[in-house]
Amino acid sequence: NAGVMQNPRHLVRRRGQEARLRCSPMKGHSHVYWYRQLPEEGLKFMVYLQKENIIDESGMPKERFSAEFPKEGPSILRIQQVVRGDSAAYFCASSPFADGYTEAFFGQGTRLTVV
Amino acid sequence: GENVEQHPSTLSVQEGDSAVIKCTYSDSASNYFPWYKQELGKRPQLIIDIRSNVGEKKDQRIAVTLNKTAKHFSLHITETQPEDSAVYFCAASKELGAGANSKLTFGKGITLSVRP
């Protein structure tokens, strides 16, 4: 099991471009969380998805940000018209089921730099 | 919503000494309290966690204590080594695992430096 895979590891975008961040959960995991870590800050929850459903997007900015977790393929966090303030590390975590006993595992993160 | 605060923001100790990192939380419904270690440029790694029905948990040189009445929990590292140098985050959630109640609220992190 390769663990939670995120790509790309590093992404540079110019202001106004779109950024697409991908997260492939661990095999058998159907729950995905996205967190954002600003420089020298803790991680902040953005969105929680199950396959084909957004369950909780209370941490997502209202504009420019969207997320999906299709039936097949990775979860995608999409940022449109990026601005300098979007520069951060974006981590996803996956979990197999809501059993109350199994932790979520983090990926290595995507470091987005907006120039 | 939940608010987790972490003190201090930096900590420097001599190799072999103990380090204690403290966190407070605000939501009495929180029941799960993990600690993560993050090395530069790497993912957060779970090092120990505790649930609200337990007051203390130990794993070799690492221990965590929880005071639900006061809403604070602490990480204790004994016999520190240079490889313990990293950023440590505390977090809280209502539940462990998956589900809407399992989203984690993190503290801002503390940079621990262990001097050889």
Image: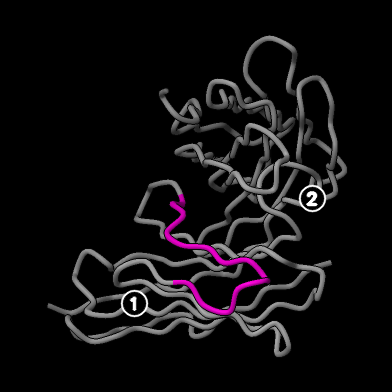
**Alpha carbons under labels 2 and 1: distance apart:** 32 Å
Quadrant housing residue B115: bottom left
- Seen from this angle, which residue lies furthest left? B116
Image label count: 2
Q: Is residue A98 left or right of residue A87?
A: right
**Over which residues does the magenta segment extend?**
B44-57
Q: Residues within 10 Å of mark 2 (few under 14, many from 20)?
A: some
Q: In this rendering, is residue A38 above or below A51?
A: below
**A106 falls in the magenta region:** no
Q: Main secondary structure of the magenta part?
A: strand
Q: In this rendering, is residue B69 above or below A26?
A: below
- Quarter of the picture holding the C terminus of chain B: bottom left
**B56 falls in the magenta region:** yes
Which residue is pictured at 73% across the width and 51% down the height? B102
Chain assignment, label 1: B
Mark 1: amino acid: Ile
Q: Secondary structure at mark 1?
A: strand
Q: Is residue A112 left or right of residue A78?
A: left
Q: Report the residue marked by disc 2.
A: A59
Q: Give percent across and percent down for residue A17.
A: 66, 27
Which residue is pictured at 61% across the width and 65% down the height? B91
Q: Give percent across and percent down for residue B89.
A: 51, 66
Which residue is pictured at 50% across the width and 30% down the height? A4
Chain assignment, label 2: A
Q: Give percent across and percent down for residue A25.
A: 57, 26
Quadrant housing residue B52: bottom right
Question: Which dot, 2 or 1, sits closer to the camera?
Answer: 1
Mark 2: amino acid: Gly
